Image (cartoon, helix red, strand yellow):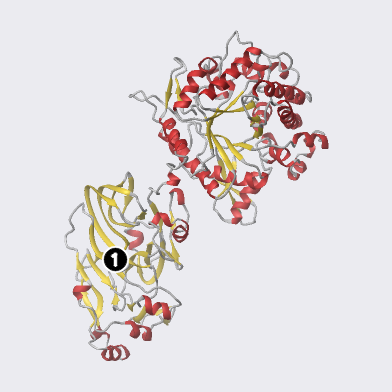
Amino acid sequence: MFPKDFVWGVASSAYQVEGTDAKDGRGKNIWDEFARSGRVYEHQTAEVCCDHMHRYREDFALMRMLGIKNYRFSISWSRILPEGTGKVNEKAVQMYRDMILCMKENGIRPFITLFHWEFPYELFKKGGWLNDEVVQWFGEYAKVVAENFSDLCSDFITINEPQCAIGLGHLNGVHAPGMKYSIPETFQMAHNLMKAHGQAVINLRKYAKQKIRVGYAPTCGVAYPATESADDIAAAKKVYFGFENPMDNWTWNVAWFSDPVFLGEYPKEGLEKFADYLPEITEEDMQLIHQPLDFMGQNIYNGYMIRCGADGDPEYVDRAPGTAKTGTGWPVTPEALYYGIRFLTERYRLPLYITENGMSDLDNISADGQVHDRERITFLDAYLGAVQRAINEGMPVIGYFLWTFLDNFEWAEGYKERFGLVYVDYTTQRRIAKDSAYWYREVMRMNGENLSCNQPYKQILFMEPVFTHNIWGGTKLREEYGYSIEGDDIGECWGIAAHPNGTCTIADGAYKEKKLSDLWEEHRELFGNTQGKVFPLLIKIIDAKADLSIQVHPDDTYAAEHEKGSLGKMECWYILDCEPDSKLVIGHNAKTHEELEDMVHNGRWSELIREVPVKKGDFIQIDPGTVHAIKGGITILETQQNSDITYRVYDYDRLSNGKPRQLHIQQSLDVIKVPAAPLSECMIKTGEAEANKLQKLIECKYYQVFHMKVEGQAEFEQEYPFLIVSVVEGNGLLNHTSVKKGDHFILPYDYGKVEIEGNLEFVASTVSTK
């Protein structure tokens, strides 16, 4: 859950929603000229846009109905001051005051941004950000804002995304004013911009009519680590605050635009790299820039993956093919929001608002007249889950402003991109609340409780198995089950394992590449909060090309005393495949312990062991103390306690690396039960399975095991603490996800209804309720 005072809201900017009016007295800004020159997508302009300046009463009423209580918006500098300085446009003042009053009538708290890229055209003609006088120009504008709106608003942000204003507009020229200045000129502009920020902070506080809160809202893509190892995290953090970008894209960094504002100095690495391009920087400049702030903002949309290379230097990691992207082609990387929050709050030590985050989608009106933007909901759910994680770990993130409320004019992309919670028909100006708007309303109302991260995990936990090579192993695991593992001696596939000798990793999803053993420790809720130090079960497929050794396992008491506190081992076998007339060793023929010792010590193996005919589909329970062995030509699925304690009684005098394998005669004699349990207690003949029914094969002290054969369609309820599933034949769809022979996965606690279609067979298991 989010803190009770967490600020949920939406964000926008003046030029992107307001539109124009020939009678309103607004002066031109650089975007008017940029659009007029035809450099916006399809020669589009913002002359009408969302017509918010005439429709804000309707829009704020819609905000109220959609549960929005906080609104970050910008004021247009050239609307307030048509020449950029001098005479104030009173019509604009009245419009904005009425806007704010209307917000308040609808229960909406205003957050004013002074500059969201709408630089007055008349000041641009005088040099714009390159003119040192811009510091005073912006300071004057801040004074006018404070004098006219601080009685109604107490939250102010000076500048939005300076990286874009300077880099996209003046270095690369893809945004207004569409110029390509020299690199030294852009450094002068950036320095002037930050001084202007400082002067604005001073004037906002000086002329405010009440106590106000002031912040700053830069941006940047986030370097996030490939794994959660300390080395990868350190490498990502180094890149995030570093200066690896080429000079023709130098503005796209965090530290240069944030360190002076929040820490009072330019970063040393930047000063060294940029030395040949820098303007004069005085102590007075730094004092001006480094004004006390109440909070920091950051706009975060996506990031890029970094790992620590073998030489200790950071390496960029390519995104996997098919990685999710938004409608604008930006990568979907919720990790960026968590690590952005983490890295920023560690470095700057201020409360943080996420002042923008959202996604462009390919929204269309459906036949029912509604806009069903499921992809946006999925995106926001994941990103807000990252914010929740940051909050859970104590990071001071205090608010989140979703970009954006209305579909709007997306700068050089015009109306190609739709970021809004509300669909805007630009021809009729009709507003249609998208599905995401209603979803976000519930998120705000429930303070995040309904986010997936705060609900039982509903995704399938697919596993990457672990394999072993054994002298008796074969090739079926590769040839018949499709596992990518080399060798002609592949004995075991540990399909579900969290054991020191081998632990599976999660193949995909939210916990991708996490070890099952770590998941057990850190997210016990996935397993119904089942008790125990270790994950309780271990699932194997065993391919016996040759006979396995004659074995026996101890119980928990014996293992705890003689095997350094280990668990004992109870297991069961489901026969996946076998040759005609196959047999297994199950039990022995000794009637007394003395007879057992004589048979073992004198090698009377043919008299001792009890061989039992088996066929495909048979199920065998192996209790501790039961002599047993898998014979060559048999493939089984084994469900067992999470232990690997095995005592070899006999190994057919085979050699491994030229030497006999170790036997455990005394331990075996200690634990073998005499007489052996009758076959009726061990063998469960499954016979012809009833289709489309989850059938319980056994429930003992440690586990329950089930079998299901699906023909067509079937369903059941996952009502256990967790359910391990191993697909042993065929393929199909399980809750819309493709599954096939050889897949091993876990359906977590409270997974709910399981719907399957196809032709497949699986064995499932969970902990016992006994």
- Locate residue 178, reporting x and y percent: 65, 23
Please state which of residues 257 and 445 is positioned toward the viewer in this rendering: 445
Please state which of residues 702 and 770 is positioned toward the viewer in this rendering: 770
Residue occupying image coordinates x 39% and y 53%: 462
Mark 1, Cα crowd under 10 Å, few <14 / some 14-19 / many 20+, is few
Please state which of residues 537 and 750 is positioned toward the viewer in this rendering: 750
Please, which residue is most extreme toward the front here? 210
Residue 671 visible at all: yes
Please state which of residues 292 and 377 is positioned toward the viewer in this rendering: 292
Residue occupying image coordinates x 19% and y 53%: 691
- Locate residue 546, reporting x and y percent: 31, 73
Name the image quarter holding residue 682: bottom left
> Horizontally, is 662 left or right of 770 in the view?
right
Q: Which residue type carries mark 1? A: Lys
Residue 409 visible at all: no
Q: Secondary structure at mark 1?
A: loop
- Locate residue 30, reporting x and y percent: 65, 19
> Horizontally, is 489 left or right of 141 in the view?
left
Name the image quarter holding residue 372: top left
- Locate residue 58, reporting x and y percent: 48, 19
Q: Is residue 538 above or below residue 508?
A: below
Q: Is residue 491 above or below residue 248?
A: below
Identify the image quadrant of the C terminus.
bottom left
Which residue position is annotated with label 1? 770
Residue occupying image coordinates x 37% and y 86%: 666
Residue occupying image coordinates x 43% and y 81%: 658
> How many numbered marks have been drawn onto this rendered protein structure?
1
